[in-house]
Structures are given as structure tokens and as C-alpha cells.
Amino acid sequence: MLTQNLVDWFIVVLRWAHIVAILGWVGASLYFMWLDSKLRKPANAPGVLGEAWMGHGGGFYIVQKRQISPGEVPSPVYWFRNEAAITWVTGFLLLVFVYYWGGGVDLIDSDNALVSPGMAIAIAIGLLAVSWVVYDTLWASKFAAEKPAVATIVSAILLLVVVYAMCRLFSGRAAYIHIGAVMGTNMVGNVWRRIIPAQEQAVAATSAGRERDMAMALRARRRAQHNTYLTLPVIFTMIAAHAPSTYSHGYNWVVMALLIVAGIAARHVMILFDRRLPVGSAWLPAAAPLVMAVIALSVLTTPQLSTGPNAATGSERPVSFTVVRGIVALRCVNCHAQRPVEPGIAAAPGGVRLDSPGEIVRHAAKINATTIATRAMPPGNFTKMTDEERALIGRWVATGAHAD
């Protein structure tokens, strides 16, 4: 028990550190994209490509973007490499202790598992490495340099394949966070392998009195653009656990694909807004995919009323609360109790307790949403709730959700 408590606290600390590192890295990335849109070229300032005045904390700051001439050595230069590294390390450790530590049982859906838990762990880790190698090889190629639009389409297709494969092999919740991990790994790889090396090469070239490698700089800028457009989809995968209607959907891979489209389009809208572009033709390529993705998501994730043999009708005899309480006790109370008995659960998830009649009735709508509409609970159906039991709960809710 003491060991599990230490692991639980270690996970809390990891989550805390992960979020802090993300604020430093992603915050800086968003800031520089915003800054580029605000820079204005000053008059009579040789070597200054643009500058912006800002106010903060009662003081005023001027930020300049400069053209570095051969022989000019800027010092010191601050990078945001460590924030990216800490984000990835803490994120990977969270995957280890949340999904791999227990043997991978939380990675798969026990009802429809296509692979063993151990194989799921190997696939999850291997895919992080393989995805980076494939992505980096593609965008470092001459093909991508000459035909970036085609390379973008190829990248989108490959990402869709990853999304589909993960949603088929893993439980919905595990699939979503691992899709985010794949995108996040590529983002960190861009920083460490392409963006920062290009900046270091620029400093080394000016120090030696040489012209910088502009082709390398262009590739680094393209990778930085990839990172900024992937930011919002990755952040959603981190909070997806709070949206069971997405990851537990029967077509969760389609939902994830639409969320990625919506996130990329929303980021483009943010960039257009930062640039203060007038509403017009420039907004259509960003706004149209965003609106269509949101509409599609709304329609796709709307719970459908059952019309099958288990559907409740007004004349149907209500299900006894004693039956419902027995199902809840068998399938839910090991976690949702004042003192959970499930290993690794210290308190009722979400503060939802189901260990008394009053609590079951009070949370009837939530029980219906998570066990019937989205089937997100129990997670991965690890307590083996049957379709018949779900139907009984649905009938009880539909006929008033009363206690006996």
C-alpha cells in the first residue's frame, strides 16, 4: 500500500512538472508566432528586420528581430530546448507509470483486444520511434523540399493511419493519449534535431565570418510551423480523458481525425487574428474546415436513442432499483466509493461515489451518459459490464431513475 501511494504521488509530481514544462515550451512557441505577426520594420535601423514594443508589469520592453552579419557573434543566445526535453521526458514517464507499469492492461479493451497487454506496450513504444523516423526522413528529403504540398498530404495520410491503428489496437482513452504522444514526440524531435541545430549553425557561421545555410534555416522554419499547427491537437489529447464521448465512440478514430483538423484550422484562425487580417478570402481556407469539423463532431457524437429490443418504452415495467444497485456494486463501486478497493485508486474518480442509494440516484444521468451513451465506463470495461446490464440501467433511467 505504501509503495502504491508513493507511485501515486510520483505520478502527481510528473503531471505537475509536465504541465509546467509545456507552459514554458508551448507558451514560448505561441509567443514567437504571435511576435512575428506584430513586428514592424523601423526606419533608419540597419540590420533590424522588425521590432515591437510591449508593456508588462509596469515596464516597457522592445523586442527586435535582427539580421546577423558575418563576424557578428550574439551572446548569450537563449534557446527553449530544455523545456521541450523536459516536456517529453515527463510525458513519457507518465505513459510508463499510468499505462505500462501495470503490465499494459489499461492499454487495451479487454472485451475486444486484438493484441496482448505486453504486445500493446511494445507497439506503443515502438510507434513513437518509428513515427519520428518516418516523419523526419520524409521532410528531410529532396522530395519534401521540392513538393511541400504533396509531402503535407502524405504526412496527413500517415497520421490518419496511425490514428486508425491505435484506436483499433488500444482502448479509446489510451489510444488518444498515445496519438498525442506520437505528435508530441515529432514536435520535440523537430526542436532538438532540426530547429535548434539550424540556429546553432547560424551562430557558428557568423562567428566564423561565413554566410549562414539558408536552406537549413528554411527547413527549420518549416518544422517550426509544423509544431505550431500540431500544438492544439496535442493539447486536446491531454484533456481527452474528460471527454468520454470522443474516445469511447464507436468511430473514435474518425472523431480524433476531425479533432486534429479542427485543432489545425483553429490554430490557423489564431494566426490570422494575430495578423489582424480583414475578414475575407484569407479566412475561408481556415474557417471552413473548422466549422465543418465542429458540425461533424457535434452530429457524430450526439447520443442516439435506442430503438432495439432493449429500448425502454413508456408502458414497459420499470427495472427494480435493487437490480440496478447490484449491477453498480458489482461493476462500479470498487472505484466509485468513499474508500475504493481498486489498486491505484485513492479516491472516487471525479468525486463520483456510488456506494449508497442516494448517490446512485443523484448520479443517474451521469451513469446513463458514461455507461450507455458513450460506454466509457468502466474504463476498458475491465469489470466486464455486460450489454444486458447496460440495458437494465438504461431502462431504469428512462423510466424515472427512482429508488425502491
Image (spheres, rainbow, N blue to C red):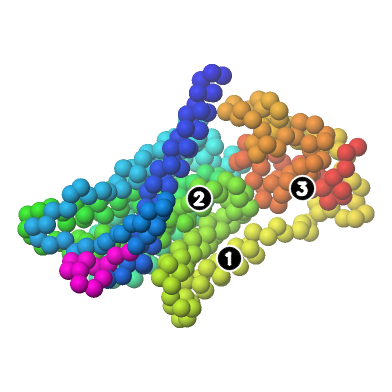
Q: Which residue is drawn at 43% across and 47% down?
A: 23
Q: Residue furthest front?
A: 58
Q: Name the residue under label 1.
A: 294
Q: In which quarter of the image is residue 311?
A: bottom right
Task: From the viewer's perspective, tell me whether residue 255 is left or right of residue 352.
Answer: left
Q: Do the residues labelled 3 and 1 touch (CB within 8 Å)?
A: no
Mark 3 touches mark 2? (CB < 8 Å): no
N-terminal of the two: label 2 or label 1?
Answer: 2
Q: Which of 74 and 215 is in front in this view?
A: 74
Q: Would residue 337 appear left or right of 232 to someone viewing this image?
A: right
Inspect the magenta stretch and tell me whether residue 51 lies in it: yes
Q: Quadrant of residue 62?
A: bottom left
Disc 3 versus disc 1: distance between alpha carbons?
25 Å
Residue 47 in the image: above or below residue 348: below
The quadrant of the rendering that contains the N terminus is top right
Mark 3 lies on a secondary structure that is: helix
Q: Which mark is residue 365?
A: 3
Name the residue tied to disc 2.
237
Measure the C-alpha gap from mark 3 to mark 2: 25 Å
In the image, which residues are magenta?
42-52
Q: Where is residue 32 in the image (x, y as percent from the top left)?
A: 35, 58
Label 2: how many residues lie within 10 Å, few (<14), some (14-19) or many (20+)? many
Mark 1 residue type:
Val
> In screen coordinates, is 220 left or right of 237?
left
Q: Is residue 37 visible?
A: yes
